[in-house]
Amino acid sequence: MEEPSISLCMIVKNEEEYLPKCLGSVQGVVDEIIIVDTGSTDATIAIARAYGAKVIPMPWQDSFADARNRGFEEATGDWILWLDADEEMDVDEAGKLKELLNREAIREQKIEGIQLVFCHHVEGGGTEEVQLLRMVRNRPQYRFEGRIHEQILPGMLKCNPGLQLGQVDIHVHHYGYLLKNIIAQDKKRRNRTLLQQVMAESPENPEYFYYWGVELLRMNDLEEALGSMEVFLKRAPSNIGKGILTSAHKYRLMVLKDLGRYHDLIRDSKESIALFPRFTDLYHLKAIGYSSLGEIDEAIHSLHGALSIGPAESEYQSIAGCGTYLTCLDLGRLYHLTGNPKEADFYFTVASLMVGHPGIRFQRQPDLSGLVFQG
């Protein structure tokens, strides 16, 4: 059986710091590398060529979709993978990619795209995990749309309404959400400019209020971020993707937390949990509201709700550890505050057992000694 070939397509500009790690993480996995360079003045192009990449110079045209599609036009592989320079495929897992593409479920079924597990590294050392579409079959009709936050799936569905997506347990680490990287790449100015353009061009599209709110939150423009998220939530159509909708609920609560509006945080978290009762991050945010107001028992109750659910499903963009070790750590701290060292020690111990095993769940028997772990 002939092994499927993979083309890696990227857009870059002045990425000499991150590009070697990105390309090194997929070395030996992809069959060709296509780099669309939009005006680098550092060593980016030399680095790309050192890894055997085909470099295509392209003037920046205020459109990520145009740049991505230019790379896709040059791809010759059976599959196209796209990454950004501040992303790295887990080197211990990357080698499994072609093996997974050889599976009958992908070869024989209508699997047209592959979702990978993205670990977004955020300030404070935490990570958010979510499944993202990053590989598609190389078909000329599969192309991106949108100046910013470009998407390929809507166009794919227009061409092939019955297509299916596959999921593989291969992780990609993304470092672009770290504040120092946002500032270094001047993403604040670029993203705001593009978002203002697309909002003027498509004022009827509520999704751009979500993306605008996310950018404002990252730049700590909290009041404006809250207003933008609320506009999105009011206007979001019933068929909007669950991923973006649940993230908007989460970000709204995060803004209320950062604003110190804890009563509003509790009220809105209850509303969000009623809609998405399996999204563990919402319980954590509600617990922050309660604990900030000194209502420790209510905070503990909310965290137990998260622990009973376990780690969030892949459709949610969830902080790693919510429903497992982070929940137990917070429970340990809160029990310590209430003067209950026995319960505090119990949850600190469970947290230490769960670290490095984010998918683990447990059920507790009535006595402290009875723990049943479920992997």
Image (spheres, rainbow, N blue to C red):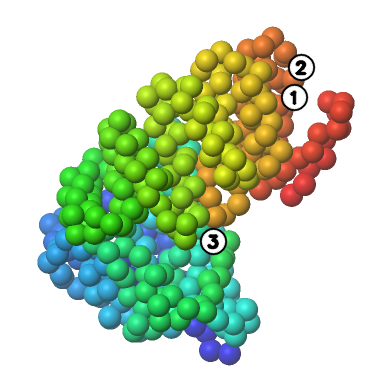
Q: Which residue corresponds to the image point at 27% horizontal and 73% vertical from the top-left? A: 69
- Identity of the amino acid at label 3? Ile
- Identity of the amino acid at label 1? Phe
Asked if labels 1 and 2 touch by Cβ distance under 8 angstroms, the answer is yes
Residue behind mark 3: 170
Q: Which residue corresponds to the image point at 68% horizontal and 42% vertical from the top-left? A: 309
Which of marks 2 and 3 precedes in the sequence?
3
Residue 110 at x, y percent in the picture:
55, 81
Q: Nearer the viewer, residue 206 or 73?
A: 206
Residue 350 at x, y percent in the picture:
72, 32
Residue behind mark 2: 342
For label 2, count other residues whose C-alpha is less than 10 Å away and answer few (under 14), some (14-19) or many (20+). few
Is residue 60 positioned above or below 363 on the image?
below
Q: Please give the count of numbered marks on the rendered protein.
A: 3
- Identity of the amino acid at label 2? Lys
Gap in angstroms between the C-alphas marked 3 and 2: 39 Å
Residue behind mark 1: 346
Is residue 40 positioned above or below 277 on the image?
below
